Image (cartoon, rainbow, N blue to C red):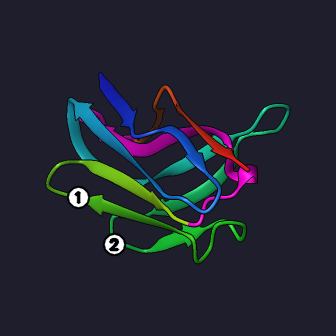
Amino acid sequence: QVQLLESGGGLVQAGGSLRLSCAASGSIFRINAMGWYRQAPGKQRELVATITSSNSTNYADSVKGRFTVSRDYTKNTVSLQMDRLKPEDTAIYYCNGVIQQLGERFWRTYWGQGTQVTVSS
């Protein structure tokens, strides 16, 4: 089994910063892309940022220039540095990973349990 565990959410004032981290653990053979999604109340889950195994990144337009996604390939972690936060960034943030387990030939998508980010105005 593979697990993704997020940390780093919380409450921050508008204009502030938070850093989210996510660690993948378990019977991992290799990891392709990892990233972050978020879901605000009453809205669908949306992509925030992704990073591939070749370090190529992709960001939602709403966070470009404010958020930075990065990976530590030796520790199977992905992080999201969030700066200049806005109230509209308030959501539950989910870590995501496309992972191949030991002994399997195919890739699966895994999700963390989510971490709450609240930005006050």
Magenta stretch: residue 29 in it? no
Looking at the rendered image, the disc whose residue lies closer to the viewer, 2 or 1, is: 1
Q: Residue at x 46, y 31 (%)?
A: 112
Quadrant of the rendered structure where residue 73 is?
bottom left
Q: Residue furthest top?
A: 1
Q: Amino acid at mark 1?
A: Asp
Q: Is residue 105 left or right of residue 110?
A: left
Q: Is residue 56 left or right of residue 102?
A: right
Q: Residue at x 21, y 42 (%)?
A: 29
Percent coordinates x, y for residue 93 in the rendering: 57, 40
Tell me where the magenta segment starts and ends, as one range: 84-106
Answer few, some or many: residues within 10 Å of disc 1's Cα (few below 14, many 20 plus, some between 14 and 19). few
Q: Residue furthest right?
A: 42
- Residue 102 visible within the image: no
Q: Secondary structure at mark 2?
A: loop
In depth, the one of 37 and 81 nearer the eye is 81
Quadrant of the rendered structure where residue 16 is?
bottom right
Q: Residue furthest bottom?
A: 65
Percent coordinates x, y for residue 117 in the rendering: 58, 40
